[in-house]
Amino acid sequence: MKTITSLYDRSRVPLYAQVASVMRQRIDSGFWTQGSKISTLEELEAEFGVARVTIRQAIELLREEGLLDAQQGRGTFVSGKPKHNRWLNIANDFDTMVSLVKDNVIERVYVEENVDAPKISKDEGKLAPEYTFLRSVQYNDGKPFSVVNLFLEQNLFVRDRKKFSHSAALPRLIEMDDIKIVHAHQVLTIGVATPETAELLKIGLGEPTADCQLTLVDANGIAIYIAHIHYHKDCFALRVDLLENKVPKSE
Amino acid sequence: MKTITSLYDRSRVPLYAQVASVMRQRIDSGFWTQGSKISTLEELEAEFGVARVTIRQAIELLREEGLLDAQQGRGTFVSGKPKHNRWLNIANDFDTMVSLVKDNVIERVYVEENVDAPKISKDEGKLAPEYTFLRSVQYNDGKPFSVVNLFLEQNLFVRDRKKFSHSAALPRLIEMDDIKIVHAHQVLTIGVATPETAELLKIGLGEPTADCQLTLVDANGIAIYIAHIHYHKDCFALRVDLLENKVPKSE
DNA sequence: CTCAATTTGTTCGTATGTATG
DNA sequence: ACATACATACGAACAAATTGA
């Protein structure tokens, strides 16, 4: 049996925090059910291959989160479940995306005109000479759940500085009848928080985020809208019905 | 200006590792280009608001990764880019998924018959009384990139124990003409590595993974295939063409 | 009621890692 | 390179609360 300490070397997170994250996952997944008694300190020591004090530090961490309740002489009990904010559904098609964004409450935290183009891969369209950079934070229930870094083609931005500066850009863009979106490309990866993102999302530096790069290309093949969206990992869920879009082929 | 130390409190990762992750991100994103000289220690101290030694620890970490090269009297230079294995494309429709899985090289690490049903939400189908639990690891270039924990309906499993035990289950399932998949539901979230997953993916405990729950429902509304797939975060990318499935409306 | 077993809580000493100036 | 401070982790011993025989 591999001890936990051999796994520990692969991460710089303190051991007790790692143990806590495993326990948290067990509560979350229902492996340890609400109200039940978990293993004794002795058993946990043996299972995780760590010292008693380390187990207690992990339990203390989860006690502060309201997940565990340790009682001297009796045992340690599950007293709650981790809260998730999985209310975010990433859109899977363009119309849904636009309709979702429309109702978003955003806070523009930064606007800078005439910036250089960001780097994108060839197949995502040609770059315009200049962009406006717009950074905004999206809130839900007073808590930040995503940071949007948007490069909007400069000429588009000047057509309605006011609206682009103070509300979601996508709905305004759709309103422009002379602009036709011919490609909408989305790439989703797992990234780490930069200082700016960490500060705005109120998370630690280097903590994981769900990163979404959304590129819109117009009829001339120009990438007019390039957004890098960083979602808080607990606010993120992508639901896909794999059979829904399969209709054309079966017909 | 917020110092990094105020952000530090939100994460239990050592400060120098956090600084390193920001620097790594800068190299990865191209903000610091290959071969160029990065800021001096003095500047980095000031920017991050940490001690000189801490900056050096971060640089040392990246030097070991082959990303930086510090030369006394000259400066510190970017000597490489982080390697990504973003060759994985999660499927967006059922046919693509099946065709992708077909060529997968997997290693079955665990099989257990007649296990209890896992927990799923109501809208993902009714549960069968018994399942077979199959755990496998997918490799690419000798490196593990995903762990699949599959609950396969027990009666299906016994129809071809051999094939289900030693190769990908999905292609075999499709071959069965009497089985009709009426729902294929996929939910993607960010999770943390359990001891088993961490060990198989060779990552640290509690490190982030891309978690994909795939549920297949047959004509009777029974969830016959429930897979929990954990992807290594660096091997994961989901590409979506948002307009692809929108053809009917624009024409 | 008492005793023993069980289980969590506390403390000590030691060693190493992290961060500052 | 050095001195200092604090966090992390171990092992071991002991204390305190609970339970049941």
Image: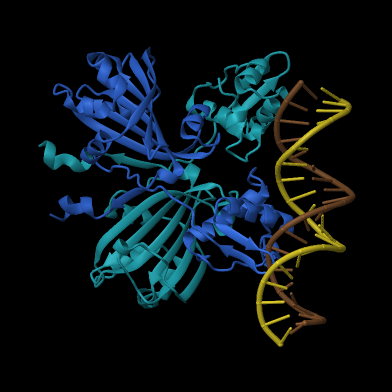
Chain colours: A blue, B cyan, C brown, D yellow
Marks counted in the figure total 0
- Residue B200 visible in the picture: no
Is residue B191 left or right of B202 when viewed as pictured? left
In this rendering, position of residue C12 left or right of residue A21: right
Give percent across and percent down for residue C20.
73, 25
**Residue B105 % position (x, y):** 45, 56
- Residue B36 x, y percent position in the rendering: 57, 17
Between residues D21 and B12, which one lies in front from this camera angle?
Answer: D21
> What residue appears at the point 57 percent right and 27 percent down from the top-left corner?
B23
Query: Which residue is rendered at x = 31% and y = 20% of the image?
Result: A165
Q: Residue at x 29, y 28 (%)?
A: A168
Question: Which residue is painted at 36% across and 53% down in the image?
Answer: B187
Quadrant of the image containing the C terminus of chain B: top left
Q: Quadrant of the N terminus of chain B?
A: top right
Q: Residue A74, how many percent across, how many down?
A: 66, 69
**Residue in the foreground of this view, choosing between D9 and A165:** A165
Q: Is residue A188 visible?
A: yes
Task: Name the image quarter holding residue B200.
Answer: bottom right
Residue B235, above or below B139: above
Residue sitting at the far left: B251
Q: Is residue A51 above or below residue B71?
A: below
Q: Is residue A85 depicted above or below A75 in this figure?
A: above
Q: Is residue A157 above or below residue B21?
A: above
Residue placed most toward the observer, A86 or A81: A81
